[in-house]
Amino acid sequence: MFDLLFLIMIGFIVGLGGAVIPGPLLAFVIFDTVRKCRVVGHYVVLGHIMWEGFIIFLILLGLGNLMIEFKDIIYVVGGSVLVFMGVSMLRGGFEVRTKDSR
């Protein structure tokens, strides 16, 4: 019983990773929603749910230790994605283009 409760708590804590702290994911949602259309935010949320579900699945399989072992690689890949997203936003020249203005 306590094992199941522990796993649920781990899943909840992992899920909060992208939901609690306003950061790059929020900036990306705002940027793409304004630039494209309202539905983009829903797609981003769905993608985040799928990614977090995948991470929880790996943890439940016992691959959490493996992820800890390769944390430096995970940090580099994650940081690279953040840099790519930031450069993509900055290349837009701080102008907001809506779907109709293209």
Image (cartoon, rainbow, N blue to C red):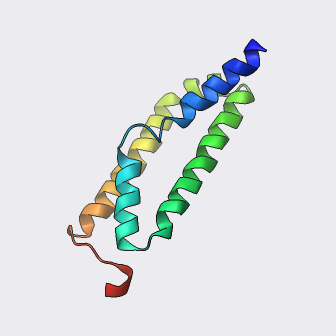
Q: Looking at the picture, how far across and down is residue 16, in whole percent? A: 51, 35
Q: Looking at the picture, how far across and down is residue 54, in whole percent? A: 66, 42
- Does residue 17 appear to the left or right of 3 in the view shown? left
Q: Quadrant of the C terminus?
A: bottom left
- Does residue 57 appear to the left or right of 76 in the view shown? right
Q: Is residue 69 above or below residue 37?
A: above
**23 and 64: which is toward the camera:** 23
- Does residue 81 appear to the left or right of 2 in the view shown? left
Q: Quadrant of the N terminus?
A: top right
Q: Is residue 21 above or below residue 41?
A: above
**92 and 71: which is toward the camera:** 92
Report the number of discs.
0
Which residue sits at x=59%, y=31%? 12
Q: Quadrant of residue 29?
A: bottom left
**72 and 46: which is toward the camera:** 46
Q: Quadrant of residue 28?
A: bottom left
Residue furthest to the right in view is: 1
Residue 102 visible? no
Residue furthest to the top in view is: 2
Which residue sits at x=60%, y=48%? 49
Which residue sits at x=43%, y=73%? 37
Which residue sits at x=22%, y=72%? 95
Q: Is residue 101 above or below residue 62?
A: below
Q: Quadrant of residue 6?
A: top right
Q: Looking at the picture, how far across and down is residue 24, in whole percent? A: 36, 48
Residue 30 visible? yes
